[in-house]
Amino acid sequence: MSTAVIKQKMRGSAALQQILAFASLVLLIIFFSLASDNFMQWSNIEGILLSTTVIGILALGTTFVIITGGIDLSIGTGMTLTSVMTGVFIVYLGLPILIGILGGIVMGALIGLISGFSVSILKIPPFIATLAMMMIAEGLSLIISGASPIYFSDIEGFHQIALGSIIPGVNLPNAILIFFLMVLIGWILLSKTIVGRYTFSIGSNEEATRLSGINVTKWKIIIYTIAGCFTGVAGVIMASRLDSAQPALGMGYELEAIAAVVIGGTSLSGGKGSLVGTMIGALIMSVLTNGLRIMSIPQEWQTVVIGFVILLAVYIDMLRKKNV
Amino acid sequence: MTDKILEMKNIHKSFPGVKALTDVQLDLYRGEVLALIGENGAGKSTLMKILTGIYQKDRGSIVYKGKEVAPKNTKEAQELGISIIHQELNLMQDLTVAENIFIGREPRDKLQFFLKDKELNKKAEELFQQLNIHLDPKTKIAELTVAKQQMVEIAKALSFHAKILIMDEPTAALTDTEISTLFKIIHWLKREGVGIIYISHRMEELKQISDRIVVMRDGEYIDTLETASANIKQVVSLMVGRKLHIEQKATNPSRWKEIALEVNQLNNRYLKDVSFQLKKGEILGFAGLVGAGRTEVARAIFGADPSTGIIKIHGKTVSIKQPYDAVRHGIGYLSEDRKRFGLLLEQTVQENIAAPSLAHYTKFTFMHTKKIKKETQSYSNQLKVKTPSMNQLVKYLSGGNQQKVVIAKWLLKNCDILIFDEPTRGIDVGAKQEIYDLLESLAKQGKSIIMISSELPEVLRLSDRIIVMNEGRTTGELPQHDANQESIMELATKQA
């Protein structure tokens, strides 16, 4: 039957986009290294990886949510709120660094939990529920910090969390290691555990999942909470890198993270996606930004190019959706 | 008898305002295929939903394996051994075969957290061997044909050690070879002692596969027949039942000379070679069971779904690629779902009637409000729309008056070919008569009308000619004087 052929094609193009994303990354790297000698310098590569970490970790978390067929707009300002709370715990309350970090991550989880509650129990559409959460987190960050940055300058070792190097003799910032560690943790969760199985199942057909006797409400809350933990980790890294919690920073990060997810081949209609794809998507965005900067293309044009890349990626996503 | 596995007795079920089931009974033996048939709305699915725990019965008893049961949800029914395979298969397209079968029961480690996929695939493999079917546990569902997907559903049901399997129109989307494979599996299931309730409209198929036939009508149990001794005519007349006296309309075929619309070899994913003519001033009825393809014909002609074929309007071949083209050529479509596709509920009566015609009343982007008001008012009066004012929001009108607003809309747009899809759905009895009169007077004024309806008395009452469809094809055409409920039902269940 012809539907079988169409479906075959559809699967083909799903895999295709991930290969496409990877190939684009390689091509971009080749292009920029030919265009500029400075591109392949270790310090530049390190810069690219470092600038991928925050958006990348946000994107990893939100990949889970997007695979369920949802969306999370609260991750940008949610990240800000976790930075601010980490600042409050460590600088204002003088708690040990480790407790402060855990507190930040728990804060992120809490934001995810509330979003998950709104989506699955109050049945508010994810776009609206997380848009509201985005605004709540933005406001709270400003209120709690009194609208001014919280500096960690006096806290010994905090800056080292992201920028120090845990491996002796190798100059590789921890933030990059943490990013790859989060990719690994996320990948295990998504492909080896019950959480991942139900993430795909819900995104594939929520009603059928419910009819199979699975507590969809509970699992959706869990999935949003996991995404919140990733937000928390991103918030701590952000704070450590800047050695301060910047309450006005973060708005817009959610969209860059979603763009990375989409470029990485995860379908906004749910059911399909991968964390390795998201990692590649995030790398493509930072390679593009970095490469264009090295080629002395003005910042304004960098944004324009990234905009077109997103259009292209979403268009491919829609072609796939059309075939279903 | 000892091998009776299921006995449903005195089942009653009401929904707010509707009696869905009244005193229904049904029994099933091990290793039997029991066909369950009835017209749309006869109560078959409600009964099956009660058996599988989707609905709860109001009264009555279900005795399963000698014990009274009342499953509260599908999972509970499944665990008892009662499974249903819905017509729209309930599978997760992006998961694999094995993942689908064991969803919610996947082998895990001690923490109940990590999956043991090797064990999962092995379990699926063993299940397939036992059932003697060939499926790769690691294939994604989306890559399988509908027939294979159905096998996955059957395997899933049997993995719960199902003793009763309900199949709802299982052959609807299958090819002939796939059907014979399915029948082989059904025969195997029978030998294994599984009782099968088989819902289908295909009479030939029921003769072939079933042991007994239960007929339902209007939410009531009618009769049980031994398949071997039943004939199709008898079954159909039991299904239709009521010998309603239907006003025969006086028609005079010579009245229609001019061909308003001619459709030739209309084909798309739902339709196969649909051809017919609609004469000027005629009401052409389209009858058939749900899913026969009647709405799809309307949508194809209206340009809402892509199709191939030749459409001629008043003798001229036209190209209709989108609804805009259809409206330009004077075709108006009144959807069966007025609220979703026919009306702007939050807008006024006037705005609704004027919506498609606005361009006509616009000069340099300014709207000629007075003229709009006058002309919408005139159509509203002509159709007797009961509304306190032209500024009333459409959502506050009754179903019948909403339907009139949709009609007025197309009349103002000068449409002379009107396609009515279930024109009286959701309209109360008194208002129905008004809509009937309106349709007849429109036809008298020279409008050409296609009327799709699932209510046979309605089709018989209004149509000058009736086309019957089944499975995307036209299976026959009946002039008004030859049409009755039996002749239509026979064509509606005929395999093309």
Image (tube, helix red, strand yellow):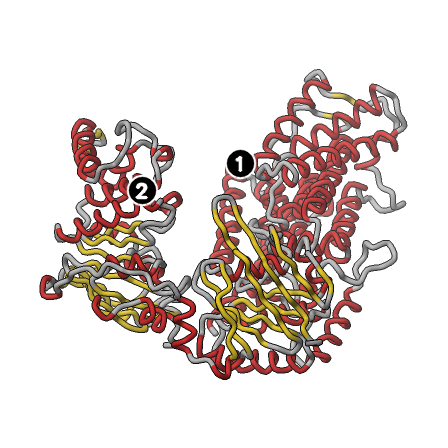
Q: Is residue A110 above or below residue B21?
A: above
Q: Amino acid at mark 1?
A: Pro
Q: Tell me where residue A302 sits by quadrant.
A: top right
Q: As drawn, is B258 to the left or to the right of B340?
A: left
Residue A264: x and y, percent?
61, 52
Q: Tell me where residue A94 sits by quadrant.
A: top right
User: Same chain for the residues at labels 1 and 2, yes or no?
Assistant: no
Element marked by disc 2 = helix
- In the rendered structure, the residue with mark 1 lies on which chain? A
Residue A166: x and y, percent?
87, 43
Q: Amino acid at mark 2?
A: Gly
Front residue of A154 and B475: B475
Front residue of B210 and B411: B210
Front residue of A311 and B319: B319
Q: Which circle, 1 or 2, is nearer the viewer?
A: 2
Q: Residue at x 41, y 63 (%)?
A: B291
Residue A29: x and y, percent?
62, 53
- Residue at mark 1: A298
- Residue at mark 2: B400
Front residue of B395 and B58: B58
How many numbered marks have been drawn onto this rendered protein structure? 2
Q: Residue furthest top?
A: A146
Q: As drawn, is A207 to the left or to the right of A163?
A: left
Disc 2 residue crowd, few under 14, some 14–19, many 20+, Cα 10 Å: many
- In the rendered structure, the residue with mark 2 lies on which chain? B
Residue B263: x and y, percent?
23, 66
